[in-house]
């Protein structure tokens, strides 16, 4: 557990506490685990008034020091109480797009279904941090019924994107019931589940849960992974249980300061996904949720990071870098641009090595 790498400056604060055997939820839990100091406790009590904390044992065991790429994602910080004027409690405008509780509808052919607001861990940078938490609850039978009715009567919806909270925190029985209801809707041909469980609490994604995901529909799992070290043997085994049921697994990551914002860390993250047969799907620009400024990486820097990997990293590891436009206007790709118009009106294209080439057939 206490992996101490003398060459790694991040290991300056070796952990001395005993191995974590249950989910850490309170400031006292964090103190006992050696993840925070007594001096930090009063400020963290303040944070706890607003935001939930949970660090499951599998994730806690990966933390080598509180400020390492794993610890930063889940250990609360006094900075969360400082709200920047550019931040918004509903950064991507979901609230205005919810026709009934548990449904968010922004795009013509697909809708979000949020059956619960509980997560296996609480990411300190979460864009839904004002909503998620153990008190956020589960849609009760009546509310879930109304959400499913909405999907049943909206026949232009072809894809249901299950998110939350984290859908894999449902019981397998409830998951099965939702799958059965969706299978009864002829217009739904694709179901997608976004989840942090494969890396946060892989044992939860056991055979019983994987069986519950089996459906006649085109089913996809999108695993939220932000650092190569999250893809432990246990996480990879959980992902294999899903893949064994003919469910493809995609990856989504958030570009985060101090977690994956170096060429080395980003390359390792993308390669670790491909090694686990996960196809990187999205690299998200951080949404400006309250108290998350310490994770912000400017878009221009994100573009430079990706450009530095172009040509070096296999194309199947290449995610789409996306921004969810604040205010509810949707997601757009913000990858580095390779095409520019030259003074003669012909397009120029930049090669991975930085050389510029005129395209003789492409007048702008
Ligand atoms: C992100 C999102 C989706 C899914 O978008 P894709 O680009 O298809 O992954 C659907 N609905 C809402 C409201 C979203 O925010
Ligand atoms: S798992 Fe997703 S919804 Fe839950 S805290 Fe993390 S980012 Fe937010």
Image: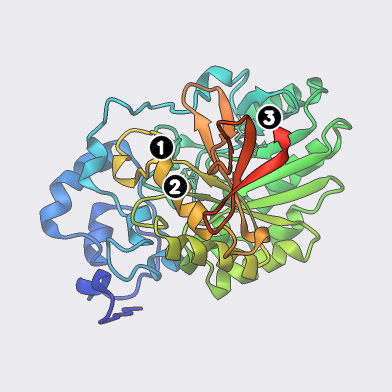
* Disc 1 CB within 8 Å of nearest ligand 2 atom: yes
Residue sitting at x 80%, y 20%: 153
Residue 360 position in % (x across, y down): 71, 41
Residue 300 position in % (x across, y down): 42, 42
Cα distance, mark 3 to mark 2? 28 Å
Q: Which mark is residue 111?
A: 3
| N-terminal label among 1 and 2 | 1
Residue sitting at x 53%, y 44%: 336
Callout 1 touching callout 2 (CB < 8 Å): no
Q: Which mark is residue 250?
A: none
Residue 139 seen in the current view: no
Q: Which mark is residue 302?
A: 2
Q: Quadrant of ligand 1?
A: top right
* Disc 3 CB within 8 Å of nearest ligand 1 atom: yes
Residue 31 seen in the current view: yes
Question: Can you say which quadrant of the picture contains the N terminus?
Answer: bottom left
Image quadrant assignment for residue 312: bottom right
Cα distance, mark 1 to mark 3? 20 Å
Question: Which dot, 3 or 2, sits closer to the camera?
Answer: 2
| N-terminal label among 1 and 3 | 3
Residue 343 position in % (x across, y down): 55, 31
Q: Indicate how the structure is coloured in the image.
A: rainbow
- Residue ID for mark 1: 129
Image quadrant assignment for residue 24: bottom left
Q: In the drawing, does residue 199 fall left or right of residue 91?
A: right
| N-terminal label among 3 and 2 | 3
Q: Is residue 343 above or below residue 69?
A: above
Q: In the drawing, does residue 362 fall left or right of residue 46?
A: right
Question: Which dot, 1 or 2, sits closer to the camera?
Answer: 2
């Amino acid at each position: 557990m206490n992996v101490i790498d003398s060459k790694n400056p991040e290991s300056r604060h070796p952990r001395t506490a005993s191995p974590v055997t249950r989910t850490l939820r309170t400031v006292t839990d964090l103190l006992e685990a050696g993840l925070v100091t007594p001096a930090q406790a009063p400020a963290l009590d303040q944070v706890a008034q607003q935001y939930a904390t949970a660090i499951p044992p599998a994730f806690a065991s990966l933390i080598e020091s509180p400020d390492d790429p794993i610890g930063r994602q889940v250990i609360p910080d006094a900075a969360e109480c400082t709200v920047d004027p550019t931040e918004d409690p509903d950064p991507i405008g979901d609230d205005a797009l919810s026709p009934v509780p548990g449904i968010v509808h922004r795009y013509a052919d697909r809708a979000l279904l949020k059956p619960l607001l509980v997560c296996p861990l609480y990411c300190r940078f979460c864009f839904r941090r004002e909503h998620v938490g153990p008190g956020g609850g589960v849609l009760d039978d009546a509310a879930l019924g109304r959400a499913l009715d909405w999907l049943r009567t909206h026949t232009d919806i072809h894809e249901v994107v299950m998110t939350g909270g984290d859908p894999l925190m449902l019981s397998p029985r409830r998951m099965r019931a939702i799958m059965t209801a969706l299978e009864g809707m002829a217009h739904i041909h694709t179901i997608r589940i976004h989840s942090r469980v494969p890396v946060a609490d892989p044992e939860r994604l056991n055979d019983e849960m994987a069986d519950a995901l089996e459906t006649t529909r085109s089913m996809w799992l999108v695993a939220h992974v932000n650092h190569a070290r999250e893809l432990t043997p246990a996480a990879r085994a959980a992902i294999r249980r899903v893949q064994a049921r003919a469910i493809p697994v995609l990856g989504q990551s958030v570009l985060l300061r101090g977690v994956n914002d170096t060429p080395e860390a980003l390359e390792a993250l993308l390669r670790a996904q491909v090694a686990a047969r996960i196809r990187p799907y999205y690299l998200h620009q951080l949404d400006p949720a309250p108290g998350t400024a310490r994770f912000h990486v400017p878009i221009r820097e994100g573009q430079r990071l990706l450009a530095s990997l172009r040509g070096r990293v296999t194309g199947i590891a290449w995610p789409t870098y996306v921004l969810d436009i604040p205010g509810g206007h949707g997601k757009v790709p913000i990858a580095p641009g390779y095409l520019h118009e030259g003074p003669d009106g012909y397009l120029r294209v930049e090669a991975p090595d930085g050389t510029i080439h005129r395209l003789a057939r492409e007048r702008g």
